Amino acid sequence: MRTSASNPFTLGVASGYPKDDSVVLWTRLAPVPLSGGGMGTAGDVEIPLEIATDSSFTNVVQSTRAVAEARYAHSVHHVVTGLRPNTHYWYRFSYGGYSAMGRALTAGNRDDVRFAFVNCQNLQEGFYPVYRDIAEDGSLDLVVHLGDYIYDSAPAPGGPRQHRTKAPVDLASFRNRHADYKMDRDLQAAHAAHPWIVSWDDHEVENDYAGNTSWYNQAAFARRRAGSYQAYYEHMPLPPDFLQPRPFDGVTLFGKVSYGDLLQFLILDVRQYRTLQPCGDRLTDCPERYDTKNDILGPEQEEWLKSNLSAESPRWNVIANSIFMLEYDHNPGYYVDGWDGYIHSRKRLFEHLYNNRVPNPVVISGDIHAGWVVDLKYHPDFPLEAFKRNDAVTIATELIGTSVTSTLSSGWVSTYRRALPKNSHVKYFDERSGGYTRCIVTPDNFRAEYKLAQNVADRLSPVKTVATFDVAAEGNPDLRKGATMIETLTDVKLVEPEPDYRVVGWRWAEGYGAGKEGYWLLPRQLKLSDGSYIEFEQLKRG
């Protein structure tokens, strides 16, 4: 029975995990989204679902009923089958006089794939112009989310907006926190426009958790983790086999999405199975960091990953990974929450890529609220020293996308910048947050466009490309050159200043010169003795 006359589709719709002939469709009935959903004691609900080849639904190819399961907060995870490859479909859920629609795209063998990857979207640190930009990009085939979809922190004043729900600790409060995020209109638009594949990092559960271990409240952690995992499933377009063969004290998030001979995505889970971070989870070095027992993937996931990486793999092999894989010597110390705490896991993966001549691996990562481009290094004789050796090969390229909103503290910026000379494998570092990475993959080239919003405090802020890199296809790891920054414009074009000259911030100065980074137009104000202001503008290299 229906418990409310309000719109039940307050959290929008989504598609995900496309295959050649199928796609997962998601929604959740939640007329009162921030207070449990508002469906009361209603049992499972069957809701009409239409699939069409046009947005006006004049050519409906399937008409069925999807089940909103009461035990999963009346969420729907409906797998539509019998579809054609490389085809756009529009879908529409209906219930109680309301409807909600979105557009999905099946996978298939093709000449190019265009996708965006995103991460770290703390609602309290800004709006989502990134998602508005992604929603408006009709050329995208897929969106990949690399974690920190929600943040588990308490409401905090002083930012552009704040959480409307209390800090989550159990299933009910994690449901409300997910709803808090899902109500954002631009995030909804990006979900409705494109299929998504997803992984998580730590803030979907708790900061820096490792497997079954909490750094904060171990006694309550099993309940917290199980509740957060269930709420995550209830709000993502995940296939039902996420639940199999385990209940929510363990789930199957890692998986594969393929686009024929061109490209495969291998989605990793680097939280659920890892051992505890070494060295007390501190930025340091210690003997424990070199222990072979440290493991970030777990045996089952590692074997699955290797089984999908061989000389016969597709032309491009994208490893979707929540936390950076590179070695980074912070001069001194290492970030042991990342793969630098699990160096033997990294060594085994790189060894496998090298020995099996896996074609064109590219790692996409998030977590650290900054944009990076990195050559991942391997040496068959000195695998643990590869990043410090001039004769090491570039086994893969790692593209680390900046955050959607979450900021990088000035302390971390200083730490990273100070250590750059010690890390010659880093080709690009940009500490600015509020962006995403758009990728275009063809048989011969992998292009990554690093994009930034001008101001995440403004929903309508423009989003611009600030750096573009190409990775040329090369099957032989001994010959790979890694990523190369390309020239996008030949000169600098200044953007006209905004009418309000009292605003202090940065504005765009478009363009690149050969070998130059982007330029920014920085408004500056000078206060005069009479209290008035004059403004001048400084052109600054990015």
Image (spheres, helix red, strand yellow):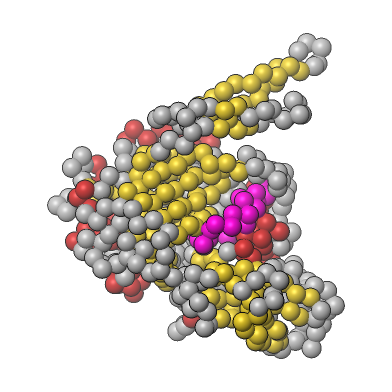
Residue drawn where x is 67% and y is 28% of the image: 496
Write the start and end of the magenta stretch as one range.
126-152
The reply, left or right, for residue 295 in relation to residue 85 is left
Q: Measured from the top left, where is residue 237 in percent x and y?
A: 57, 72
Question: Is 503 a magenta residue?
Answer: no
Name which quarter of the figure residue 429 lies in: top left
Q: Residue furthest front?
A: 58
- Is residue 78 visible in the rendered image? The answer is yes
- Is residue 254 visible in the rendered image? The answer is no
Q: In this view, does 123 lie above or below 493?
A: below
Q: Measured from the top left, where is residue 214 in percent x and y?
A: 49, 64
Which quadrant is the N terminus positioned in?
A: bottom right
Name which quarter of the figure residue 170 lies in: bottom right
Residue drawn where x is 69% and y is 76% of the image: 58
Q: Is residue 62 above or below residue 486?
A: below
Q: Decide which of 304, 191 is in the foreground and name it.
A: 191
Q: Decide which of 78, 439 is in the foreground and name it.
A: 439
Residue drawn where x is 50% and y is 77% of the image: 84
Q: Measured from the top left, where is residue 361 in percent x and y?
A: 32, 57
Q: In this view, does 148 lie above or below 169?
A: above
Q: Measured from the top left, where is residue 462 in percent x and y?
A: 64, 42
Q: Which residue lies furthest to the left in this view?
A: 381
The reply, left or right, for residue 214 in relation to residue 159 is left
Q: Which residue lies furthest to the top in this view?
A: 529
Residue drawn where x is 31% and y is 46% of the image: 482
Count of marks overlaid on the render: 0
